[in-house]
Image (cartoon, helix red, strand yellow):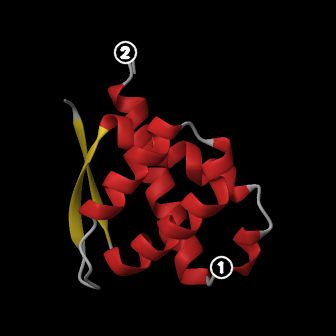
Amino acid sequence: MSTLSVRVRNPFVLRGSLEVVLEVARMDLANAEIEEIRGLLGAIPNSVRPAELQIPLPAAQAALLAVRYFHHSRTRHWLREEMVGALLDLERALERHLRDAAPGG
């Protein structure tokens, strides 16, 4: 299975942000996508130190989809700035990696 390597500045903040994203976007996601994100959440260290995450391709695609749904929600405006920033950083990194991994990309 292919994985993407993503550098995360603060895994603790990212984890909390993704938990909110999952709650908000869960109605728009398939069960398999929800499970991929849950698996990703379990793999994020509970630390404030920068970390390199190895994200399986299906989890990366599911997380990117969920973050995109989340950006159109009202809840996004209630999140702390650092949490929104962590999601934007993740989104940019996943987009770049997925674009590079695409055939002909």
- Mark 1 sits on what residue? 79
Q: Earlier in the sequence, mark 1 or mark 2?
A: 1
Tell me the quadrant of the picture where the N terminus can be found.
top left
Dot 2 falls on a residue whose secondary structure is loop
Q: Is residue 76 found left or right of 60 in the rendered image?
A: right
Residue extending furthest toward the top? 104
Reply above or below: 34 against 84: above
Q: Amino acid at mark 1?
A: Leu
Closest to the observer, 47 or 39: 39
Q: Amino acid at mark 2?
A: Pro
Reply above or below: 65 against 47: above
Closest to the observer, 91 or 43: 43
**Would residue 100 be seen by someone viewing this image from the given angle?**
yes
Q: Position of residue 13 (x, y in %)?
A: 42, 79
Is the residue marked by circle 2 packed among few (<14), some (14-19), or many (20+) residues within 10 Å?
Answer: few
Residue extending furthest toward the front? 31
Q: Position of residue 93 (x, y in %)?
A: 41, 51
Q: Position of residue 95 (x, y in %)?
A: 47, 42
Tag 1 and tag 2, C-beta contact below 8 Å? no
Q: Residue at x 64, y 53 (%)?
A: 25
Q: Which picture quadrant has residue 24?
A: bottom right
Dot 1 falls on a residue whose secondary structure is loop
**Mark linked to residue 103:** 2
**Mark linked to residue 10:** none
Reply above or below: 17 against 58: below
**Would residue 10 be seen by someone viewing this image from the given angle?**
no
Q: Position of residue 44 (x, y in %)?
A: 28, 66
